[in-house]
Image (tube, rainbow, N blue to C red):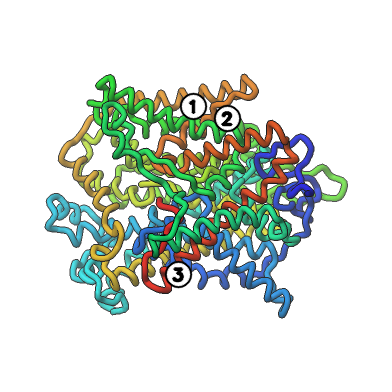
C-alpha cells in the first residue's frame, strides 16, 4: 500500500510538517501534510455570509446537547465533533453540487473556512462561555432569597445584568416564550454589551495570532495536529475517503457507538463500554481515597487523536497524571492535606503555563525583534523578481503587523478600561487582562505544537490565581464583585476561542487562500456565534426552564457567586503556600525545558506537566497511554513508512466515533429524547 501522506526526508512523523517557504509562497499552498504544492483555492466573498445561518442552527444544537441533554459534550474536546460532523455534511452536499452545478461547488478553502467559522462560533455556545455568562447575569437577581446573593445586585452594573426578576420567571421556570417585547426589551441591552465585549476580547486574540503565525508555522514549523483531519477530509484528491484502513477504523469506532446507542434504548442488547468509569467509590481506604475523581476509559477518538501527538508528549501526559495523583496520596498519608487545597496542583500547573510562555518568548526573541522592526517600518512591499524573499513579509497576513500591534494595544486597553468601569482598580484590571492573554497564548501554542485532546485548565484564570496570590484583604465588595466577572470566560479553557482563530489561519495557509477573508470570516462568526448562543439559550430556557428541566442550568453561577461570598465573608491574606507552589511549578517546567535542550531524547515534556494537572485529563489518560504504546512500537519497528501507512486507520477512529456519536445526538434532537452520549465531559 502506498504511503498515505508524503513527508520530506528527515522530518518527524508527529504531525503535518510544512515545507520551507520561498518565493513561490504567494502562488502555491501545501497539501494536508504541508509537503507538496497545491493549487490556490478560491474563496468567494459570499461564503462567510452563507455560513451564518448554519452557525445559528449549530449553536442551537450545541446548547441542546450540552445543557438540555446529558451530552455529548462536544465543546469540551479540542476537536469539536459538531464542526467535524457538519463539515462531513457539507462535503456530501458538495458532491451533488460538483455533479449538477459545478460552478456552485465549494473549493477546499471554502469548506475549511466554513469549518473554522463553525468551530469558532460553537466555542461560545458550549459549557464554558456564554452559558456561564447568562447564569451570572441572572442568578443574583432571581435567587435574591438565597443568603448573600441580594447584596451583589447593588454592585452589578445594570447594563451587564437582567435586573427585572419578573422577566426571569419564565426563564427559570419554563412554560413561557422569549418572544415578547417586555422580555426582549430588557434582555437586548446586556446582550449587546456582552457581545461587543466578547468580540473585542477575541479580536485581540486574532491580532496576536497574526503576529505569531509566521514564526510558529513557517519558522518553527509547528505541526498543528488538530488541522490534519479537516485537511484530509477536504483534500481535493479525496485520498482519505479511498483508504481502506480509514474505513476499517471508521466502522470499528462507529460500529461501537452504533451498538452502544441501541443498547442505550434496549439494555438487553450487548454493549462495548468505552466511556469513562469513575473508580473513586472503590478507593475507600486512606490514603488512596485522596486520589479523588479517577477513572479509566477507552475512547477510540482520543486514541486516534493521540496517534498524531509526539511520543514524548504522550508519555508525559499519562506519567504526570499519576505524578499529580501521587502528590495527593502522599499528602494524605503524611497529613499535609490539612492545609486547604494542598498540594496546590492548580498553582503548580499555572506556574508551568507561565514557564512555557516565557520560554516561547525567549526562543522567539530574534523573530519578535524583526517583527517589531517591521511594525516600526510599516507594511512590507512585495518582493521583486530576483530579489531575496522577505522572511517577514506581512502582505499575505490577516492584517499588517503594524495594524495588528496597534489593535492589540488598543483592544487590550479597551478590555482593561471595561473592567475599570465595572469596578476594578486599574492596576488589578491591567494585571488580570495580561494574565488572561498570557494563558491564552500558552494554550494556543500548546495546541499548535501538540494538539492534545483536552486542555481545560480549570480554575486557573486570573480571578482564581490573583486572590490566592495577593489575598483579598483590603479589597471592598465592589472590587471583588467586579473581579468575579472574569469567572464566565476563565472557569475552564476547554473551548478557548484563540486556538481556533490561529488554526483557521493555518488552514488558509495550507490552501493558499486569502488570509484576510479567513481573518474577518472568523470574526464574523464570533459576532454571529455569540448572538446565536444567547438566542438558543433564551429560546430553550423560556420554553423549558433552566432551573426545571435543564442539566446544570444554574450550577456554574452557584460556583462563581459562592466563591465571591467566601471572599467577602472571609477576607484572606496572600497564601504563601500557594505562591511557593506556583514557583515550584515554574521552576519544574523550566528545568524540564532545559533538560530537553541539553539531553536529546529526554522523555519528560513540560507541556505534559502543565496540562495533566487539570480535571479533563482524567477522561483521556488511558487512551493516550494506548496511543503511546502503539506509536512507540510502530516507530521503533516500522519507522516512518509504517507510521504514515497506519495514519488513516487512526483518523478513521476519530471520524467514526465523532460522526456516529453526533448522529445519535441529532436523533435525540429530532425526537426530544435522551440518546447515547459518546463523550461525557
Mark 3–mark 1 Cα distance, whole angstroms, equals 45 Å
Point 24% across, 75% down: residue: 175
Along the horizontal axis of the image, is 132 left or right of 443? left
Residues at marks 2 and 3, CA–CA distance in whole angstroms: 50 Å
Q: CA distance from mark 2 to mark 1?
A: 15 Å
| Most foreground residue, 297 or 477 | 297
Rendered residue at 20%/69% (across/down): 169
Nearest the eye: 219 or 589 = 589
Q: Which mark is residue 362?
A: 2
Q: Which mark is residue 589?
A: 1
Task: Give percent across and percent down for residue 284.
Answer: 26, 33
Task: Kindly check if marks 3 and 1 are in contact, taking CB atoms under 8 A apart as contact.
Answer: no
Residue found at the far right of this picture: 386
- What element does badge 1 sit on? helix
**Which of the 4 quarters of the picture holds residue 538?**
bottom left
Label 3 sits on residue: 667
Picture layout, residue 656 above or below residue 429? below
Sequence-wise first label, 2 or 1? 2
Q: Residues within 10 Å of mark 2 (few under 14, many from 20)?
A: few
- Between circles 2 and 1, the one closer to the viewer is 1
Say if mark 2 contacts mark 3, CB within 8 Å: no
Amino acid at each position: 500500500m502506498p504511503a498515505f501522506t508524503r513527508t520530506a526526508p528527515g522530518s518527524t512523523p508527529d504531525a503535518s510538517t510544512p515545507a520551507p517557504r520561498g518565493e513561490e509562497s504567494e502562488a502555491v499552498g501545501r497539501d494536508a501534510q504541508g509537503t507538496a504544492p497545491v493549487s490556490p483555492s478560491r474563496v468567494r466573498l459570499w461564503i462567510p455570509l452563507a455560513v451564518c445561518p448554519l452557525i445559528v442552527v449549530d449553536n442551537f444544537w450545541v446548547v441542546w446537547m450540552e445543557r438540555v441533554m446529558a451530552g455529548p459534550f462536544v465543546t469540551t474536546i479540542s476537536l469539536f465533533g459538531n464542526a467535524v460532523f457538519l463539515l462531513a455534511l457539507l462535503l456530501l452536499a458538495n458532491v451533488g453540487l460538483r455533479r449538477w452545478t459545478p460552478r456552485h461547488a465549494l473549493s477546499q478553502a471554502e469548506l475549511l473556512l466554513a469549518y473554522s467559522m463553525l468551530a469558532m462560533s460553537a466555542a461560545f455556545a458550549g459549557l464554558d462561555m456564554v452559558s456561564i455568562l447568562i447564569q451570572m447575569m441572572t442568578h443574583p437577581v432571581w435567587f435574591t432569597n438565597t443568603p448573600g446573593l441580594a447584596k451583589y445586585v447593588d454592585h452589578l452594573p445594570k447594563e451587564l445584568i437582567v435586573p427585572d426578576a419578573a422577566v426571569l420567571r419564565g426563564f427559570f421556570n419554563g412554560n413561557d416564550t422569549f418572544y415578547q417585547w417586555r422580555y426582549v426589551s430588557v434582555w437586548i441591552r446586556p446582550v449587546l454589551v456582552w457581545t461587543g465585549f466578547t468580540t473585542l476580547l477575541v479580536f485581540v486574540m486574532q491580532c496576536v495570532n497574526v503576529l505569531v503565525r509566521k514564526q510558529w508555522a513557517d519558522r518553527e514549523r509547528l505541526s498543528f495536529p488538530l488541522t490534519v483531519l479537516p485537511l484530509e477530509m477536504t483534500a481535493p484528491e479525496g485520498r482519505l475517503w479511498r483508504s481502506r484502513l480509514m474505513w476499517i477504523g471508521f466502522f470499528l469506532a462507529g460500529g461501537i457507538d452504533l451498538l452502544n446507542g441501541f443498547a442505550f434504548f434496549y439494555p438487553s442488547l450487548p454493549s462495548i463500554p468505552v466511556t469513562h468509569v469513575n473508580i473513586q467509590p472503590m478507593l475507600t481506604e486512606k490514603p488512596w481515597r485522596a486520589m479523588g475523581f479517577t477513572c479509566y476509559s477507552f475512547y477510540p477518538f482520543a486514541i486516534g487523536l493521540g496517534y498524531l501527538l509526539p511520543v514524548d508528549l504522550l508519555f508525559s501526559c499519562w506519567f504526570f497524571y499519576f505524578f499529580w495523583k501521587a502528590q495527593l496520596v502522599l499528602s494524605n498519608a503524611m497529613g499535609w492535606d490539612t492545609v486547604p487545597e494542598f498540594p496546590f496542583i492548580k498553582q503548580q500547573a499555572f506556574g508551568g503555563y507561565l514557564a512555557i510562555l516565557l520560554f516561547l518568548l525567549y526562543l522567539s526573541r530574534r523573530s519578535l525583534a524583526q517583527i517589531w522592526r517591521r511594525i516600526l517600518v510599516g507594511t512590507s512591499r512585495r518582493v521583486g523578481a530576483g530579489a531575496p524573499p522577505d522572511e517577514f513579509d506581512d502582505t499575505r497576513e490577516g492584517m499588517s503587523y503594524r495594524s495588528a500591534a496597534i489593535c492589540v494595544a488598543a483592544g487590550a486597553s479597551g478590555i482593561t478600561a471595561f473592567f475599570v468601569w465595572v469596578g476594578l482598580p486599574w492596576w488589578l484590571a491591567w494585571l488580570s487582562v495580561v494574565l488572561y492573554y498570557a494563558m491564552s497564548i500558552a494554550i494556543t501554542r500548546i495546541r499548535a505544537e501538540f494538539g492534545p485532546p483536552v486542555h481545560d485548565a480549570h480554575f486557573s484564570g486570573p480571578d482564581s490565581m490573583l486572590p490566592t496570590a495577593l489575598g483579598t484583604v483590603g479589597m471592598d465588595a465592589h472590587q471583588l464583585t467586579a473581579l468575579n466577572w472574569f469567572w464566565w470566560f476563565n472557569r475552564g479553557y476547554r473551548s478557548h476561542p484563540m486556538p481556533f482563530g490561529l488554526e483557521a489561519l493555518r488552514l488558509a495557509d495550507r490552501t493558499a487562500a486569502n488570509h484576510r477573508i479567513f481573518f474577518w470570516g472568523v470574526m464574523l462568526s464570533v459576532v454571529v456565534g455569540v448572538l446565536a448562543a444567547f438566542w438558543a439559550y433564551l429560546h430553550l430556557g423560556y420554553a423549558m426552564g433552566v432551573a426545571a428541566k435543564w442539566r446544570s442550568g444554574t450550577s456554574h453561577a452557584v460556583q462563581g457567586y459562592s466563591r465571591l461570598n467566601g471572599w467577602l465573608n472571609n477576607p484572606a491574606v496572600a497564601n504563601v503556600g500557594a505562591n511557593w507552589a506556583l514557583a515550584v511549578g515554574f521552576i519544574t517546567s523550566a528545568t524540564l525545558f532545559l533538560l530537553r535542550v541539553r539531553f536529546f531524547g529526554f522523555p519528560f515534556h513540560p507541556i505534559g506537566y502543565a496540562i495533566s494537572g487539570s480535571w479533563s485529563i482524567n477522561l483521556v489518560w488511558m487512551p493516550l497511554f494506548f496511543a503511546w504504546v502503539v506509536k512507540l512500537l510502530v516507530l521503533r519497528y516500522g519507522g516512518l513508512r509504517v507510521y504514515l501507512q497506519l495514519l488513516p486507520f487512526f483518523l478513521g477512529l476519530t471520524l467514526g466515533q465523532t460522526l456516529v456519536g453526533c448522529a445519535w445526538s441529532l436523533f435525540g434532537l429530532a425526537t426530544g429524547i435522551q440518546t447515547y452520549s459518546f463523550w461525557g465531559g
